[in-house]
Amino acid sequence: MKFDPVLLAPRMAPMKAAGLWRDETIDVHVQRALENCPDKLAVVAYAAEKREPVRLSYRELDARVDRIARGLVSLGVGRQDVVTFQLPNCWEFLALCLACARIGAVANPVMPIFRQHELTFMLNFGESKVFIVPKVFRGFDYEAMARGMRRDLPQLTNLIVIGGEGDESFEARLLRDDTPALSGPGIGPDDVLLLMYTSGTTGEPKGVMHTSNTLFSNLHAYRETMELGPDDIILGASPMAHLTGYGYLAMLPLILNSTTVLQDVWEPRRALQIVRDENVSFSMASSPFVADLCGAVEAGDRTTARFNKFCCAGAPIPPVLIERAQKVLGMRLCSAWGMTENGAVTVTEPSRAMEKSGVSDGRPLPGMEVKVVDANGIDLPPGESGSLLVRGASQFGGYLKRPQFNATSADGWFDTGDVATIDAEGYIRITGRSKDVVIRGGENIPVVEIENLLYQHPAIAVVAVVGYPDKRLGERVCAFVSLKPGASFSFEEMTAYFERLQLTRQYFPERLEIVDDLPRTPSGKLQKFKLRSVARAFGDVD
């Protein structure tokens, strides 16, 4: 694969001169752990269907990474080739990330919720050479799905199944003893390390490119702000195929030479048991995870005094949850805002969490800048709402094959598509989104893609998809449609239609509203703000 991270070159000299880009790859940190604490636990991986977790020290993890890296090379994977894996939170996920870096390949984790419709696009667009899936997870047969996709993936050379049988099993292909020792160079600090797809307004996922320098500059700044160190034990329950999981629950513990504890299926009571058994001290996820933990404790379960710090990203934290978490869990909730394109840009420090997390989304981490501008690009004073722009060390390298969407000015400012205010201390508050995206439980819902699919249904004349408030998930999805003359359409038909298209189920609208016509401007443009106002009445909020 030929990558085109055009946003890197202008920043290289100043970022390295400032010490923000340290030219360290993840292997540097693993080797440091092998020198200083080889027998310390690197990962503890809990699986819902197993009684006991897998426990791997740094020495044991490194040995498996080496075998997997050699196995990938034996399959023909080379520098800057893309390896796609659709896995839950498991030790194999972590090992694959490290193995790719060790041979200079590009890791491309994709969410387990994705199905054929999204995956076929992603694997072809990224020219993936290897696709790794579990045999079965949460009752879904990933192996059968992946095999059924192969005819539509001409560049895919290898399908590997964790828990599978025969020559295509993970164990047979990537944990072999007879592969040659590694000889080539690993990933370079300015090579593309990670390809991660994000939903947007274009109707198709965009491939975000990160390097070790862009990603790790953010993780170093984050660990300092969040006061994290090698003695912390971090719970990884948020999906690791999101940047939150990949960066802060997989890579960050390795940089700290600490321990990450993985939970593959979210269940709050089991999470609390894991917290107690493993002496967990910190985690990061969207606010519904914290609400669930509060509910479990209120129902009679127990937490620990050590698990007293949590960072919430993905959507603003409801102020009532901050007070509830402090009272019920003894926990400080730190707010954060960021994107796949740049990681956590703003964070509320633990010392200011009770004061600021309910009214802000944090202030910029070291190495990052933010500003709010009006429609003419003029900086706005504190308290005024406008477009949020970002620039700095952790900014991505660009969108794969789509530099026209990079939305970055000549002086490095990236248009986030969000609307925000900034207070006198530099804390931002997201007040809206100019991008047409709904965020449901921290997951971006690709509105344009859903609308395009509904437009293809023979009964539908006009469609608009908007979000409506939900006190647990932040937002849910409502489809407003007007029908062609004489046509009929129902919620059940809509669900069956998306199932036939093999769309990710989490993208299905939860509500269907059939209307005579949709509100428009005189020029014919749909007025979604009016639909959002209508949909707000459907919401479940305090």
Image (spheres, rainbow, N blue to C red):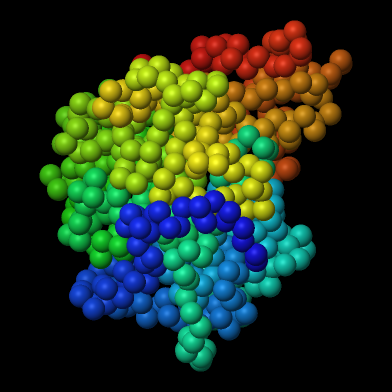
Q: Is residue 161 above or below residue 263?
A: below
Image coordinates of residue 27 in percent, x first then y, are 37, 72
Image mark count: 0
Image coordinates of residue 372 in percent, x first then y, are 43, 26
Q: Which residue is at a point 49% across and 29% down the rendered structure image?
A: 418
Q: Which quadrant of the figure has residue 512?
A: top right
Q: Is residue 540 above or below residue 416?
A: above
Q: Which residue is at a point 34% across and 71% down the rendered structure image?
A: 28
Q: Is residue 210 above or below residue 131?
A: above
Q: Quadrant of the image for the N terminus? A: bottom right
Q: Residue furthest right?
A: 486
Foreground pick, 256 / 238: 256
For residue 127, side relative to residue 357 (left or right) = right
Q: Residue furthest left?
A: 305
Q: Which residue is at a point 76% across and 21% down the rendered structure image?
A: 462
Q: Which residue is at a point 62% across and 61% down the rendered structure image?
A: 3
On the question of residue 506 being in view, the answer is no
Q: Quadrant of the image for the C terminus? A: top left
Q: Is residue 81 above or below residue 49?
A: below
Foreground pick, 215 / 198: 215
For residue 243, side relative to residue 516 (left or right) = left
Foreground pick, 8 / 153: 8
Image coordinates of residue 503 in percent, x first then y, are 66, 43
For residue 370, side relative to residue 162 (left or right) = left
Q: Residue furthest top?
A: 522
On the question of residue 418 being in view, the answer is yes
Image coordinates of residue 453 in percent, x first then y, are 74, 35
Q: Which quadrant of the figure has residue 296?
A: top left
